[in-house]
Image: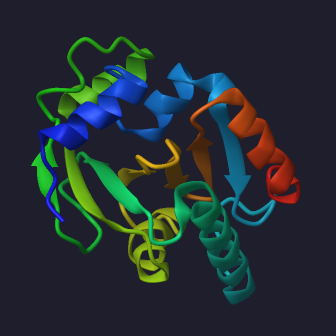
Amino acid sequence: MRFDDSSLNLFSQSFGAVPPMGPALVASFTTRTWRLYSGGPAVRVPVTPTEVSEARHRHSTAIMAVVGAEAEYFAFVTSWSGTLPAGIWTPAWNAIVPRGWEGEGWVQELMERATIYVERGRLRGSTIERLCMPMVLDMIDARLAIWSPATGAVYCPYDGGADIVMRSESDTLDAQKLFAEWCV
């Protein structure tokens, strides 16, 4: 699937000038954000086969619930080094989103040096393995945000967990109840 300007407009309608990067979204939408841990607070980055298996299960279950199985998604990778997970990536937004957005200083500085790449597709198990797990296992020096136009949720995996920004505060509370054991 192709990425086009209408996709950019859809994201901007929901999030304004905030760039599609976890720390920026979390800082801007704190009441709509909840955090998923890959294996509990004691496990920062999954290392053992058991920890990796648990992380894979948690991330797959949560992203399918909040983004939707087979749902259309836009995956945004913010990169400073040009390192990207395998996929079909189009440079986008590096000159559009950071302008006019005023966030925390360190995030603002990162965005000024970053290039944002985008991929559009349908969410499947292979998508999670290819996109999310390298971030969860801290294998790539980049940030990932997977956004669903249908649910409005943005899934932002990182080393050891994920920040999930929901469409509304009530959606956030519902997700926190559903995944209560994984949000501790």
As rendered, which of 93 and 136 lies closer to the eye? 93
Residue sitting farthest toward the bottom: 49
Quadrant of the drawing holding the N terminus? bottom left
Left or right, residue 96 beside residue 177: left
Residue 172 percent coordinates (x, y): 71, 38
> Which residue is at 23% across, 45% downward?
80
Residue 102 percent coordinates (x, y): 36, 11
> Which residue is at 63% across, 30% downward?
168
The image quarter containing residue 160 is bottom right
Residue sitting farthest toward the front: 150
> Which residue is at 49% across, 41% downward?
152
Left or right, residue 152 beside residue 101: right
The answer to whether residue 141 is visible is no
Above or below for 173 versus 54: above
Above or below for 94 versus 184: above
> Which residue is at 59% across, 45% downward?
164
Residue 43 percent coordinates (x, y): 75, 63
The image quarter containing residue 114 is top left
The answer to whether residue 175 is visible is yes
